[in-house]
Amino acid sequence: MQTVAIFGVGLIGGSFGLALKKAGFGGQILGVSSARTIDEARAAGAIDCGASMEEACREADLLYLAQPISRILELLPALDPLVREDTLITDAGSTKLAIVERAAASIHRAEFLGGHPMAGKEKRGASAADGDLFRNRTYVLTPTQQTSPRVEEFKHWLEKIGTNVITMDAAVHDRTVAFTSHLPQLASTALAGTVDGRVDTRVAGSGLLDTTRLALSAYDIWKDIISTNSGNIAEALDAYIAQLALIRAHLDSPALQQDFERAANFRGGLHR
Amino acid sequence: MQTVAIFGVGLIGGSFGLALKKAGFGGQILGVSSARTIDEARAAGAIDCGASMEEACREADLLYLAQPISRILELLPALDPLVREDTLITDAGSTKLAIVERAAASIHRAEFLGGHPMAGKEKRGASAADGDLFRNRTYVLTPTQQTSPRVEEFKHWLEKIGTNVITMDAAVHDRTVAFTSHLPQLASTALAGTVDGRVDTRVAGSGLLDTTRLALSAYDIWKDIISTNSGNIAEALDAYIAQLALIRAHLDSPALQQDFERAANFRGGLHR
């Protein structure tokens, strides 16, 4: 792997570039983005230089797609005629089934591997990129039919940058993140909407700040996530509403103690 | 105000003692608690010495009740025969209507003022007490029929320790905190219970940690809060369930953008 092209050099793409360099990658890192983003990513040291899509496809051994999901879905069919046959295309989209299916239908000349680094932070853009963003974080890869040297080499770099690689079926991944990521987001959004306008929020503790922090998230990122996973998210919301109704029924019952203890055990067991 | 007696010298009671001293209170601070708690509170510098309930009622100009709500409800009738007539009794319980009603029915010989400092942290006990815990925090007081010198003096100390004093009817307070504090707690408990056992939590981001932090809270504190505010909490849970159902209905609709934007505006406008 001599040349890597990162498509969309924001927080995730930029952090991948920085992490590769930090882990000793000595090849060239190209960035495919708007001119302003390229400048920002070069200034952050995340890429060596900008490139057009065509140049990147001609030169890169690895294409790392870190754009919004809808952009990745549009891009995949356009990449196929341009890539070299020994290229590996991978992505970092937050939902996997739509992307993996689009890749299966449109990438014929190269190899595709779906991926999702379980990492992020509140700030966006290459200027917030961090070479340690993926360290000790789970990195989900969707299954491949057979191992190839390119896939093995990419996994090797993921380990070098400190991720914990898990292979998971795309549909299972999407149902999992509906509960672990998309539900917390919508629970927070709904909580803010519930309190808004109803009471005097000068009378509030730090718990409201904690539980509504995610409500600050930008819709333009969540739009694609939700539209490509709405069935699983609806299931997660239904389960959450049922759990809230159960707790409501337990308000005057000793059964509430078990609800609290189970929740505390769950939270205590989450790895950070 | 020469002598203050703090009943229950845990996080809140201990922090009140430390804050008084920091603000220049030169009188004596007594602690009424178990022997172990008294030792811990003295070591933390939150009180000068321990006292029995009878001693404290004989000597103190201000009784500050910082115990669990159920203990305050039990204690009030026992205090009335013991206190001096010029004593002010106040409390720091997280719900107000049950306490204010109990005080109206049982405190005849002294004056009672309900209170609720909107402050806390994850750690408990006098060893976690902090003289700045109340600084820049809202401190709710329930209305009094007429101002008295003792009440004015207590308010003066609340201002000196840096709180923002708000007067609010006990019933309005309880409905308010049902939305701003009790609902976030139960939303977090329910979220943990929903995710628990359903999916592989190695595949989770930081959002799950944020939104389930409150799920670590101890049931023994929440038991009293919930049992003295279950009507308002049921209303808040119903409103939250309705908001979640609305968001579920918007999953495939452009209306979801407004839900996100409203939530972000609300959260951005919360004071810290």
Image (tube, coloured by chain):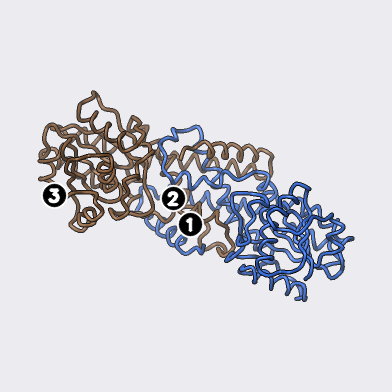
Chain colours: A blue, B brown
Q: Is residue A228 visible?
A: yes
How far apart, in angstroms, are the residues tagged by discs 1 and 3? 43 Å
- The disc label shown at residue A82, or none: none
Callouts 2 and 1 close, C-beta under 8 Å: yes
Question: Which residue bears the numbered disc 1?
Answer: B193
Can you tell which of label 1 and label 3 is closer to the viewer? 3
Q: Chain of mark 1?
A: B
Q: Chain of mark 2?
A: A
| Image quarter (top left, top right, bottom left or bottom right) of the N terminus of chain A | bottom right
Residue A120, position as x, y percentages in the image:
61, 55
Assign a secondary structure to mark 3. Answer: loop
Q: Chain of mark 3?
A: B
How far apart, in angstroms, are the residues tagged by discs 2 and 1? 10 Å
Q: Nearer the viewer, residue B154 or A232?
A: B154
Question: Which residue bears the numbered disc 2?
Answer: A247
Q: Is residue A193 visible?
A: no
Question: Which residue bears the numbered disc 3?
Answer: B51
Q: Quadrant of residue A75?
A: bottom right
Assign a secondary structure to mark 1. Answer: helix
Q: Residue at x 62, y 67 (%)?
A: A163
Residue B123, position as x, y percentages in the image:
36, 55
Q: Residue furthest toward the top? A: B146
Q: What amino acid does circle 1 point to? A: Gly
